[in-house]
Image (cartoon, helix red, strand yellow):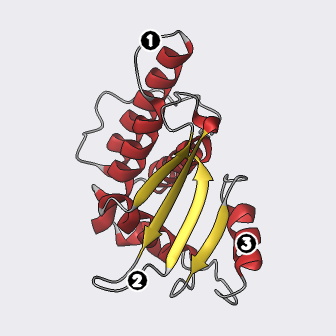
Amino acid sequence: MLNLSGMTPPLDPLEPRNMSSGLAKRTLKNLDFIKNAALAGEDVHPVTQAVNSLLGLLVFPVEKEKNFLAALRDVKFDDHSDLQGVCVTLTKHLPVPSLRVTQFEKCKDLGCFFVRVRNAISHKHLEFSGDSDSRVLADVQVTLKDRQEGRPFNWEITMNAEDLERLSRYVAKRVIDQGL
């Protein structure tokens, strides 16, 4: 089992990169490398790596991996207007304790949640606050927003970059476990 705290399983050298699980394992390896390099004082950017990792895992190639999203559709949000209830449900199923939910329209299940995260990152609807130049993941707040084209934003969440990295590791683990 993959440890979400940063230990990457051994990389199978025969597993191709164009398999989602191969990409996921390499993504975890890169996350670990950048995180360790930052701790050693190297001029690297772990916040950027966390965003890029989640983007890569959710857009390429998970966008075409409908099984990944289908497996998450069982976790439902009873009332998307009950932001506290949505937050409780999300933090129960995802390793994101810093999560704050500001808007959550048209998001009925966990599969939809990941589609909205994917949209926010791929359309660059994210904002960095706090000490956004910090290389310490816990110091940087990341707000992700989504909307239908030409309409106001109707979905918004905020978490620290440490939780964004945890979310990347969660997605990678699911991809690896599902053998996609």
Position of residue 44 relative to residue 76, above or below, is above
Q: Position of residue 126 (x, y in %)?
A: 42, 57
Q: Residues within 10 Å of mark 3 (few under 14, many from 20)?
A: some
Position of residue 60 relative to residue 80, above or below, is above
Judging by the rendered image, the residue that carries numbered circle 3 is 89
Q: Which mark is residue 42?
A: 1
Q: CA distance from mark 1 to mark 3?
A: 37 Å
Of tags 3 and 2, the one toward the viewer is: 2
Whether residue 104 appears in this view of the structure is yes
**Residue at 28% of width from left, 67% of height from top?**
64
**Residue at 50% of width from left, 18% of height from top?**
38
Of tags 1 and 3, the one toward the viewer is: 1
Amino acid type of the residue that numbered disc 1 sits on in the rendered structure: Glu
Whether residue 3 appears in this view of the structure is no
Q: Give the structural element (helix, strand or loop) at label 3.
A: helix
Amino acid type of the residue that numbered disc 2 sits on in the rendered structure: Pro
Of tags 1 and 2, the one toward the viewer is: 2
- Of the residues under marks 3 and 2, which one precedes in the sequence? 3
Along the line of sight, the residue nearer the viewer: 136 or 16: 136
**Residue at 42% of width from left, 45% of height from top?**
51
Q: Give the structural element (helix, strand or loop) at label 2.
A: loop
Q: Position of residue 59 (x, y in %)?
A: 31, 59
Judging by the rendered image, the residue that carries numbered circle 2 is 152
Q: Position of residue 169 (x, y in %)?
A: 53, 44
Judged left or right of residue 139, residue 29 is left
Q: Are marks 1 and 3 in contact (CB under 8 Å)?
A: no
